[in-house]
Amino acid sequence: MRAFAPGRVNLIGEHTDYNGGLALPFAIAEGVTVCGRTRAEPRILARALDLGEEDEFALADGARPAAGDTPTAGWRAFVRGVAAELGAADVALPGAELVIGGEIPRGAGLSSSAAMAVALGLALLGLADAELDRRALARLCSRVENEWVGARTGLLDQLASLFGAADTALLIDFSTLELSPVPLLLTSGWRLATVDSGERRELAGSLYNERRAECARACELLGVDSLREARREDLAGLPEPLGRRALHVLDENVRVRATVAALRSDDLAQVGDLLNASHASLRENYDSSTPAVERTVGHLRDAGAAGARMMGGGFGGSVLALLAPDMPLPSGAHPVRPSRGALLVRSLETSSDY
């Protein structure tokens, strides 16, 4: 059994997912692969190839952490968390041996964590000969990150990994979880590329969780369930920095819709302008940039990028750049384009596949 789950790039729509807003991510070619086979003992043995580490636990040990408990540390939290959440969803897991490998740099803002959770979920479901609706699996993987890993992520990364398609971005409405494919055809020499800022991002330990709490507090003061329901004219009554946080979310939703329109009319130059505006808001209203990220964005724009902005939750990681047809690929840049979503192969062709 082999499961592959891709990482993702979010073209635009940052910090909108947990605010009931809009986002426009796409899956990338790089991802996490989990190979697995059943074993007689009711235990799971997992090996992380990249780290040279392993973890083994009895399936009966896979209980949800109690309130206040410290989540299991590192990659092991994903394995134990996915097993426990599948068990809580009444999936009868067999004993299993899992081998985990990946090609997404950790902490780069390309969602290696969601890819790992999704790949683990698909692999264990395959070994159990069970199925789960992909939206339900996205929610399950999000719970693993929230409750086991300690990162209060939304559903953007998991949905992009599970529903991605080649040459397609995915418009996600987080108020309804409606998914709409949007053509993202990089033609006539246009390219998208990521550049590592050189500053590793640790989502669970960053200010990401603080930003989520600020948005929740803004909702309380405004008397709304999510910032998607907020009105721009009401933001003036919010104390700072809550007003700026909410302003970013409202304006970012507008930019997502404008980007969809620009893509449908094949106006990639306008997409570049919208990426620049998104970055400015993330820096000035959301305070999620860093000096390393700003230097990287500045270098890319100076080199001729049509647009550049920070990716993922911010506070380090990679920068996304839209490169015009006449711009050479910058040093250290990694081209990305929309690729297929998560995939499960139920039988391995050779023993070397495991």
Image (tube, grey):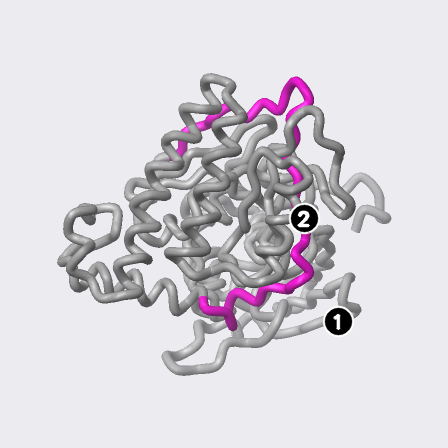
Q: Is residue 234 visible?
A: yes
Indicate whether residue 199 is drawn in magenta: yes
Q: Is residue 40 left or right of residue 148?
A: right
Q: Can I make out residue 155 in this image?
A: no
Where does residue 277 sit, x and y in percent of width and height? 44, 42
- Identity of the amino acid at label 2? Val
Q: Position of residue 313 (x, y in %)?
A: 49, 57
Q: Is residue 164 above or below residue 242?
A: above
272 w.r.t. 223: above or below: above
Q: Nearer the viewer, residue 73 or 291?
A: 291
Residue at image location 69% in from the left, 22% down from the top: 189
Q: Which segment is the magenta one? A: 179-207
Identify the residue under disc 1. Answer: 53
Q: Is residue 119 above or below residue 145?
A: above
Q: Find residue 205 and report its horizontal and vertical position in percent.
A: 51, 72
Which three-letter amino acid code belongs to the residue tagged 1? Glu
- Residue count near mark 2 (Cα–Cα under 10 Å), binned few <14, some 14–19, many ≥20: many
Is residue 304 shown left or right of residue 10?
A: right
**Badge 1: few (under 14), some or many (20 or more) residues near its Cα, within 10 Å?**
few
CA–CA distance in space, label 2 to label 1: 29 Å
Between residues 234 and 147, which one lies in front from this camera angle? Answer: 234
Residue annotated with mark 2: 195
Which residue is at 64% across, 63% downward? 199
Nearer the observer: mark 2 or 1; the answer is 2
Q: Main secondary structure of the magenta part?
A: loop
